[in-house]
């Protein structure tokens, strides 16, 4: 899972050569709006799910789109007991972000699926497989004028990754920053997660900073 940089919507130059001869503005000071693409990528299946939002990308947004994905796709993965989520250690999905951890624990319990959060260390996000899909999207609409949100969605839905079109959705809900738990509430969340350390995981040392297990029950992940 990862998000792309916000895209300004308007008659702006996006580099490259125009496909239809249209002229673009030479500045982008006043965009109509902006959208952020956020993706869920399944590397083994080469399947990409893209969620666009005009709102802020928050902890609640990230877990909401994960839940949307899981509700629609879980019938394909009935034998799956643990979801492994590879993510950058960003400010909205950090394991220290109280609202994110609250929501992801609630997700695990609600859907009765174990979660392993696997974070890329700083400066290593380029190794996240989803980063390659952003390059395809950028090349796909390079040189085009994205005047409307619908134009961005159309380009996203017509791009291809390994011969497959992504599933594209626009999220209409508005999200607010700054939602967080009290220290007392977060202490209860900490009791429901396991930060892997040298003592809890002998194969890969120092996982405590980057790997977190969340069990949907008292049974630990194997």
Image: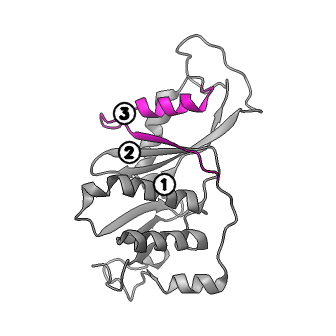
**Observer able to see residue 95:** no
Which badge, 2 or 3, is on the more N-terminal residue?
2
**Residue at 46% of width from left, 83% of height from top?**
192
Q: Do callouts 1 and 2 mark residues in contact (Cβ within 8 Å)?
A: no
User: Toward which corner of the image does residue 77 lie, by quadrant?
Assistant: bottom left
Where is residue 59 shown, x and y percent of the image?
58, 62
Where is residue 78 shown, x and y percent of the image?
24, 62
- Looking at the rendered structure, the secondary structure element under dot 3 is loop
In this figure, which residue is indicated by the disc labeled 1? 65
**Residue at 55% of width from left, 28% of height from top?**
151
In this figure, which residue is indicated by the disc labeled 3? 160
- Residue 144 horizontal side relative to residue 195, left or right: right
Q: Is residue 85 above or below residue 135?
A: below
- Looking at the rendered structure, the secondary structure element under dot 1 is helix
Colour basis: one colour
**Residue at 59% of width from left, 70% of height from top?**
99
Residue range in magenta is 146-174
Q: CA distance from mark 2 to mark 3?
A: 9 Å
Where is residue 160 shown, x and y percent of the image?
37, 33
- Residue 209 horizontal side relative to residue 80, left or right: right
In this figure, which residue is indicated by the disc labeled 2? 48
- Residue 91 horizontal side relative to residue 193, left or right: right
Question: Quadrant of the image for the N terminus?
Answer: bottom left
Question: Quadrant of the image for the C terminus?
Answer: bottom left
Which mark is nearer the camera, 1 or 3? 1
Which badge, 1 or 2, is on the more N-terminal residue?
2
Q: Is residue 218 above or below residue 107?
A: below
């Amino acid at each position: 899972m990862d998000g792309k940089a916000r895209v300004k919507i308007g008659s702006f130059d996006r580099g490259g050569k125009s496909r239809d001869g249209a002229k673009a503005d030479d500045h982008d000071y006043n965009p109509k709006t902006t959208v952020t693409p956020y993706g869920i990528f399944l590397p083994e299946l080469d399947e990409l799910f893209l969620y666009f939002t005009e709102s802020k990308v928050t902890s609640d947004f990230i877990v909401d789109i994960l839940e949307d994905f899981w509700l629609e796709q879980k019938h394909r993965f009935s034998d799956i007991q643990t979801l492994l989520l590879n993510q950058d250690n960003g400010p909205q999905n950090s394991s220290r972000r109280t609202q994110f951890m609250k929501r992801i624990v609630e997700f695990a319990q609600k859907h009765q699926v174990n979660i392993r959060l696997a974070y890329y260390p700083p400066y290593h996000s380029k190794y996240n497989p989803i980063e390659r899909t952003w390059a395809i999207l950028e090349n796909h609409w390079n040189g085009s004028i994205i005047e409307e949100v619908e134009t961005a969605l159309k380009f996203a839905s017509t791009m291809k990754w390994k011969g497959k079109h992504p599933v594209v959705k626009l999220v209409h809900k508005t999200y607010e920053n700054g939602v967080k738990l009290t220290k007392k509430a977060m202490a209860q969340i900490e009791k429901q997660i396991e930060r892997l350390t040298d003592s809890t995981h002998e194969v890969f040392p120092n996982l405590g900073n980057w790997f977190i297990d969340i069990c949907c029950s008292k049974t630990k992940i194997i």
